[in-house]
Image (cartoon, coloured by chain):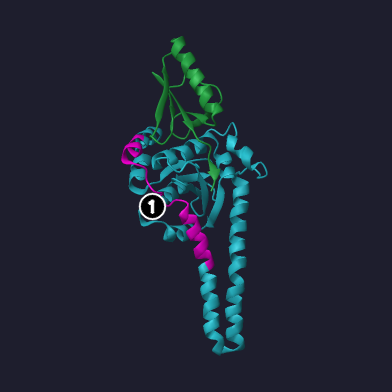
Amino acid sequence: MARLIRMDTTGHSTLAEWTAGDSDAEALAVAEFRRELDAGWYAVVSEGEGHARQVAELPLDAELVILRRPIAGG
Amino acid sequence: MSGAPALPETAAVYWRPRADARRLRQRGRTWTLTTVAHTVPYVATAGGLLALEPLTFPVGLVALAQAWAIPELYARRGANVIRPRPRAEEGPEQVALGLLGDLVGHDARELHARTGLVPERGALGVWLVGEAGAVLVARGGRRVFCWCVTVPEPDLPSADRVAHLLLALRSDEEGFATVANLAFSGAPWRLRRRMPPRARPALGVAIGMARVSSPSM
């Protein structure tokens, strides 16, 4: 089952879960994804060690999509 | 590390040229020259005073102390980027640690448990990612760059802070180095002396990894 998670003060929160072909769950996940991006979160798909991809649309074929806050120079 | 799309955060620092290996080499050299320019006048003053009037040696000693302290202060500033921050409550910390553990391999997980830093090999060298910054050991292992970069969310668990930086780094390494502020560049031994003792083994590991990859910066 694929998951959309957000790294927050709880460690992380699972916002949506879906399986391929479950269009209702996918639609909910997409809506949740857009809401979080609108709220200023960035989405990243981890692609194994050393690799990650910033995404602007929810990749429904990804196993795990992680929402992160913007970083800034300190 | 995939270098394709730019990290969105680079838009906030649009005036900075995008970091790459050549620019990093230049910044490293500039940093060293600046440090030399700051220290040489004090050494020259000490030598000059001693040559003109040996009785001024106490003043010369003060000048030499100043010449010694300046590079040390820079190195300390560099080490500060990887100092641990206050931890969140244990529950969220454990949850965040689980996610971070899923993102890295066994060796990196083990090093993080020992030192609080996650090693990550990139095109520019080997990174040590901490909670509020990262150290880049340039390829060849003879120079380090300390970067101050953080998630401006004070209540995040420490492992989540590391994961934020790690994912941004993996998304766009050069963009990451563009967004981050350079706090120090110099020889690894300078940094090592100022690092928290717990974190020092991580620097040794990163230097070893950086020596495996080719040309030095």
In this image, B37 relative to A16: left or right? right
- Quadrant housing residue B179: top right
Residue beneath the point at 46% across and 10% down? A23
Specify the amino acid type for callout 1: Ala
State the image quarter where residue B21 is shown. Answer: top right
- B158 or B51: nearer the eye? B158
User: Magenta segment, principal secondary structure?
Assistant: helix
Q: Is residue B182 left or right of residue B91?
A: right
- On the image, the x and y values in percent for residue A30 come to 50, 18
What letter labels the chain drawn in cyan?
A: B
Residue ID at (36%, 49%): B115
Please tell me which residue is depicted at 37% across the width and 45% down the height of the picture.
B87
Magenta segment includes B87: yes
Shown colour of chain A = green
Up the image or down, B84 lies above or below A66; here it is below
B170 falls in the magenta region: no
Give the quadrant of residue B120: top left
Residue position for label 1: B199
Residue B20 screen position, x and y as percent: 60, 43
Q: SS of the residue at dot 1?
A: helix
Of B32 and B78, nearer the camera is B78
Q: Given the image, what chain letter belongs to the residue carrying mark 1? A: B
Residue ID at (50%, 23%)? A33
What x and y, as percent, mark residue A34?
A: 53, 22
For the residue carrying disc 1, how many other residues have a C-alpha within 10 Å: few (<14), some (14-19), or many (20+)? many
**In the rendered image, is residue B153 in sight?**
yes
Q: Position of residue A48 (x, y in %)?
A: 44, 30
Magenta span of residues: B70-95
Q: Is residue B139 visible?
A: no
